[in-house]
Amino acid sequence: MLLGRTANGLYWMNRYIERAENMARLVDAGLRMALTRTQSASEEWNSVLLSAGSDVAFTQKYDDYTAANVADFLLRDTSNPSSTMASIETARNNARMVRTALTRETWESINEAWMALKRILAKPIDERDLPSVLDAIKRETALIRGSFYGTMLRNEIFDFSQLGTYVERADNTARILDVKYYVLLPSISWVGSTLDNYQWESILRSVSAHRSYRWVYDADYKPTNIADYLILNVRMPRSLTFCYRFLAEHLKFLGDDYGERQACHATAEKTQAMLRSGSIKDIFDTGLHEFLAGFIRDNTRLGDEIAQDYRFY
Amino acid sequence: MRLAAFDEMLPEVSGLRRPYSAYDRWLKEQDPARLTEKMQDAERVFRKTGITFAVYGEQEASERLIPFDIVPRIISGNEWRRLTQGIEQRVQALNAFLDDIYHRQEILRAGRVPRELIARNEAFLPEMIGVRPPAGVYTHIIGVDIVRISEDEFYVLEDNARTPSGVSYMLENRETMMQLFPELFQKIKVRPVENYPQLLRQSLAAVRPQRTKGAPTIAVLTPGSYNSAYFEHAFLADQMGVQLVEGEDLRVVDGHVAMRTTEGYKQIDVLYRRVDDAFLDPLTFRPDSALGVPGIMDVYRAGNITIANAPGTGIADDKAIYSYMPEIVEFYTGRKAILGNIPTWRCSEADSLKYVLEHIHELVIKEVHGSGGYGMLVGPAATKKECQDFAKKLQAKPSNYIAQPTLALSTCPILTEKGLAPRHVDLRPYVLVSDRIQIVPGGLTRVALKEGSLVVNSSQGGGTKDTWVLDD
């Protein structure tokens, strides 16, 4: 038996842990672009902010898209509710609320991540330290994930946690793609220029897939392959298909446990079926941007339905 | 002013006391540097596990640790037996008093407690008149604050009969000590306290409503994660294996209190609430409360839920009632109180007020309804101006205050940078009441860390120690 409020806390705790890490990953990709291609750096930082869904809030506060400003806003700034620091703080508050549902190891890893990041992000980040700060963030979230997977019982608590992780992750991957969809369109760049190559690598880097891409596809970056990898690949842990495989699976566990199917089951299964039967050609034919916009909308709806069906409020 | 206090380890007159002899032998073999290291380990353990408490009025340090001292406070088996007899008698009297005060009020008729003390007391809940809680128990969980002033003199300082806190520190302190010094526990036989959560669960299950079918569903009600004792609420729910609920999770469904789960509403039979009376039911008490459950009092009066502790138990641990405890104990148990009270002047009485004003520099003066060491004056430690200011408040509303002599609370050594140093301590053992009375051998020892200070409250710079009851 699980309280609706606890399920809600677990769901959002994991969404925010995922988000804390995603912010670091986005800054990482932006940093790489800015280092290699200094003339259009501000454009790059702009798309990083767009992917993070924080561009409007950013421009209210800053005039320049510089590495220091963007990193500060996305990593440290607690007035930005999606920044790494704000996310880890929200994750910890949720963890405190659902403390009785967590193993000691999981709670301690979240609490320690919060303590460590509070220390690391206490002062503005010196640009020279940025890489090590990003590493530290990824390490802390990896430790949380490790303790979580290593110690949690695979019951409804685990299911609601995973739902949060994968809804957030699917949203994040879709947004990264949507911000850069135009560089993946075949009409513009069938034969990749150097510029495109950077852009493509940047996309892969924002989902930590620039190395694994080469294990699966050719060494060359091809826009259709990149889109295929991030949308349809079953084994790529940040692809939309991968996320939906697990969303559908955990929802099925819950449905079986409780002996009741809900609206969210149908929504998740519909998206999963669409991804499973779809080809990257179909997606490009209907329009990559339209596809992604529709996906993001459905994914948000799934989150709302889960909250309603399982009495989060 | 320095008070000549009785030290529980090394009294000046007689040398090392027996309960400490094995510990002292061990301590003398230890390298001081290693002990300092262990002290830092302890702090790390506490911070890592998130055992913190919030201090009201301190924004920056919103989460702080209660300092922990690694020198245990040791009580012999014999001392403990004497204490438990006194506590049992007192707890019986408290429950009998509550039952009486909400029913026939014999003690008022007999003139042993003045009627106006009850009638005009905010802790007395008219809503409880004629209500008999399941199993007839009013106060299920009690923390009796005891002070010692000599080898043989123990006094009750306060009966915490509402929602006493601190038991998680008793448990975590022991856990920490066992992690830091496993060898000590092999050398010295210390009675275990670890089973408190199981005992609490059994005790709560035993007082379930009569009509409960099968095993009762128990839950802990917390005001939420911003409450200063939230860690303890979560800890106890976790250790008992029951749900930790907030007001927003609960509602009255078909005459029962139920919690909103992912599968719908589920009935609760026993609610261990850590929310004050005033916030329990917005329909009955404070209408602005979001921490309670609208309608829970109706369910309670219908006998469909156990609330532990029962609403209205505050009338038994009120500081104005406290001074009548010797009479109360004698009235209901027919015997003299085994554990004494500290002599108390009720400032509502003209003679007493006069005495208190004349001797303000020697006395401890407390607000009748205060807690946590707030709003009190420790005369000997106060400046002339502080005493004068307090005297004015006292004269403005005498019935709001009681006064007690400044007792030389016993001391117990703590480890400082310069080695062992005596500090004043008190003791809060925890008592569980169901169809029987159970007292866990141990309790929370609070220690005033500042040299000479008599205020042990954690909110005012107090720390804690592990409390050992020897199995001898």
Image: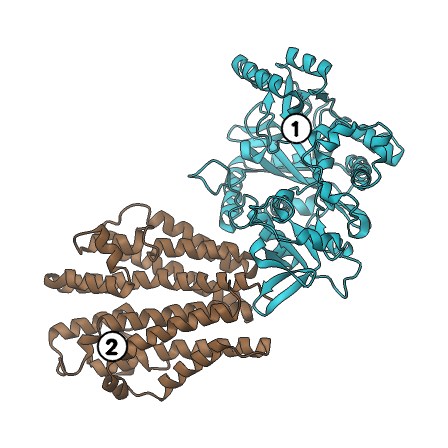
Chain colours: A brown, B cyan
Q: Residues within 10 Å of mark 2 (few under 14, many from 20)?
A: some
Left or right placement of residue B194 versus residue A311 in this view: right
Q: Secondary structure at mark 2?
A: helix
* Residue ID at (54%, 75%): A254
Residue B74 found in image quarter: top right
Residue marked by disc 2? A289
To which chain does the residue with label 1 belong?
B
**Label for residue B368?**
1
Left or right placement of residue B326 versus residue B60 in this view: right
- Give the x, y percent position of residue B179: 59, 49
Extreme right residue here?
Answer: B334
- Give the x, y percent position of residue B295: 65, 54
* Residue ID at (32%, 77%): A294
Left or right placement of residue A52 versus residue B27 in this view: left
Residue A204 in view, yes or no:
no
Identity of the amino acid at label 2? His
